[in-house]
Amino acid sequence: MPAPERLPAPGVSATGELEELLARGELRVVGRIREASNAVLLCSVAYGGVSTDCVYKPVKGERPLWDFPDGNLAQREVAAYLVSEATGWGLVPPTVLRDGPYGEGMVQLWIESGAEGSANGDGDSVDTGPPAGEGATAGESGDGSGLLALVEGEEAGEGWKPVALADVGEGRTALLVHADDPRLRRLAVLDAVINNGDRKGGHLLPAPGGRLYGIDHGVTFHREDKLRTLLWGWAGEPLTDEAREVLTALAARLADGEPLATRLAELITPVELAAVRDRVADLLRTGVHPRPSGQWPAIPWPPV
């Protein structure tokens, strides 16, 4: 029997075909992501003569979170993907909820990042002998993509947005900055909509061809403001015209009875779905990127 054809890079095949492959294909566990906070398995998936690599996060392997008592990480990861697709920006790799070798879980297309040694693996390496993929790491900032950096002084410099001063040891501080990049700006808007409580540097995956993906969206959709991110550089600045158009269209798709709203209602609670609608409405009303609430640390720890 001939070996399945390997799937080309993301963007070559239609998103629907990738979802079908992930949802219906045969999952085979290749290895486990070492030191991930929850069970994260690297798998191959094959269906209809096509195969690719993917990440499988079984619900049984999740650690309970006291402040997220409803639902599970896997459901919220899929919900984040659906919202990302609804924006048209395609910022989250194709993600499905399905049964697997260890029960129901989230299955997501594996992304080999354009940054050396980077892939969607919860920020850690894979326990299969030689690493099959590692979380994004690079330079001093820990994302490996040229999108984040630590700089001396208090000026971000041209093409960069300041985030915060960081303690780099021995009584020294440096300015944490991120690139003034439209892909990151879209991701900042998406994070505001889904209320992402954990946007770290290692969750940014620049892929070949210029695409940027964000991964690890299990800590999202809380009804309270939980936004913690490294992408505060646009805080208080006006949203782009593109973002306003996208949010207007998204608001319509979140209305009762719309397919997106119906599917999200299967993944998050009614209160959380109402909060998504409220956040979109607030972004459109204010017309600016949100600022830190000041109620708790605005930057995730560790930042990578």
Image: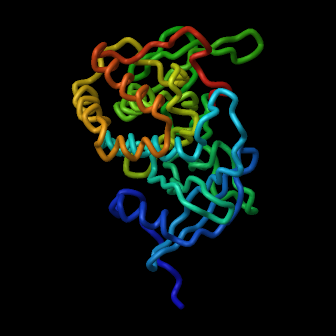
From the top left corner, tell me how far across and down residue 153 is, in percent: 56, 10
Residue at screen point 51% across, 19% down: 225
Residue nearer the viewer, 194 or 212: 194
Residue 47 vertical position relative to residue 257 in the rendered view, above or below: below
Residue at screen point 37% across, 51% down: 209
Q: Can see residue 133?
A: yes
Q: How many marks?
A: 0
From the top left corner, tell me how far across and down residue 164 is, in percent: 56, 14
Report which quarter residue 63 is drawn in.
Answer: top right
Residue 280 vertical position relative to residue 33 in the rendered view, above or below: above
Report which quarter residue 172 is drawn in.
Answer: top right
- 11 left or right of 128 in image: left
Q: Quadrant of the N terminus?
A: bottom right
From the top left corner, tell me how far across and down residue 295 is, in percent: 58, 10
Q: Quadrant of the C terminus?
A: top right
Residue 205 vertical position relative to residue 51 in the rendered view, above or below: above
Q: Can see residue 110?
A: no
- 213 left or right of 286 in image: right
Residue nearer the viewer, 243 or 219: 219
Residue at screen point 45% across, 33% down: 270
The way the protein has been coloured in the rendering is rainbow
Residue 146 vertical position relative to residue 98 in the rendered view, above or below: above
- 149 left or right of 247 in image: right
From the top left corner, tell me how far across and down residue 273 is, in percent: 43, 32
Residue at screen point 51% across, 70% down: 25
Residue nearer the viewer, 177 or 289: 289
